[in-house]
Image (cartoon, rainbow, N blue to C red):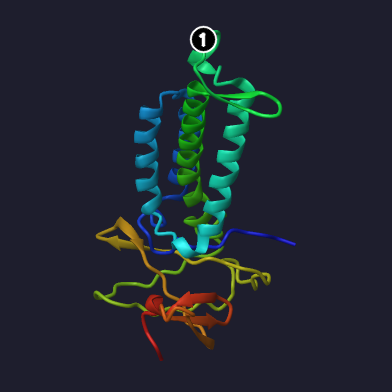
Amino acid sequence: MRAAFAYLGRGSWLARRDPRSLLLAAFLFVIGAPQLRDARQLLVVAVLALGYYLLAGIPWKSVRRQWMYLVVVITAVAFVNALITGGQSGGFVGTETHVLLTIPPFGAELTAEGISLVVTQVLRFIAIAAVGFPVAYAIAPGDLGPALRQLGLGAHAKGLADFSWDGKLADGTTAAPGVYSLSAQLVVNGRTQSAASVLANARVESVTIGADQSGLTLSLAGLGDIAFSDVRQIR
């Protein structure tokens, strides 16, 4: 059985970037973020990371459970760690701590330094998650794999350009059954300008109205559920 993250960032600014740049950004961030221990610095980094995350265009309702679970787990682990260490971590090791209260029955001490440790750890991991989520949800399935076939569409005026794939590979053999991704690039005067949006035709199997009357959701054959606002053409 093969499992993959849903492609939720379709069409977003980050989804149109080279997927290797998203991987590099996440890698460098994971290396650099643990080096910061000042909560003020981490707050700035977390805000920047969340801004980067918003560029992925990931719908909140699709990942809110993941975020809630992540925040709860991170906060719980950081709080337990603060109780165990008393906040004596990093620059506080070997220094006198300031006890705010003692938690019975084991006498665990909650210190000002411990609270500072909780805040820095939560900010750090939220920032890392904000940079990591686009890797999971804004890279199209197959973007990191080899191109199986390239189709030249020729010159086209501005607007939609129809094309179809017959399921054949570059050597003329039929592709094996599976899930494939399509990508397109706009070439002007021999130079690649940008990635172009790719739209797919699909049969509508059902239409669902949101419980809060928020909008329509279409169930498409082979593509799953999409919002009606994402539909570009009805035939």
For the C terminus, give its image quadrant.
Answer: bottom left
For the N terminus, give its image quadrant.
Answer: bottom right
Name which residue type carries label 1. Glu
Q: Nearer the viewer, residue 84 or 199?
A: 84
Q: Nearer the viewer, residue 49 or 176?
A: 49
Locate residue 207, reporting x and y percent: 50, 87
- The quadrant holding residue 41 is top left
Locate residue 16, reporting x and y percent: 38, 57
What is the crowding at mark 1: few (fewer than 14 residues within 10 Å), some, or many (at least 20)?
A: few
Q: Which residue is mark 1?
A: 96
Residue located 37% across and 60% down the image: 12
Helix, strand or loop at label 1? It is loop
Residue located 52% across and 52% down the image: 67
Determine if residue 153 is in view: yes
Q: Nearer the viewer, residue 147 or 7?
A: 7
* Above or below for 138 versus 156: above
* Above or below for 101 versus 77: above
Locate residue 96, reporting x and y percent: 51, 10
Q: Nearer the viewer, residue 33 or 42?
A: 42
Determine if residue 144 is in view: no
Locate residue 149, reporting x and y percent: 53, 65
* Above or below for 112 versus 58: above
Q: Please, which residue is most extreme toward the bottom here?
A: 235
| Horizontal side, residue 149 vs residue 48: left or right | right
Residue located 42% across and 74% down the image: 199
Residue located 67% across and 23% down the image: 107
| Horizontal side, residue 213 vs residue 117: left or right | left
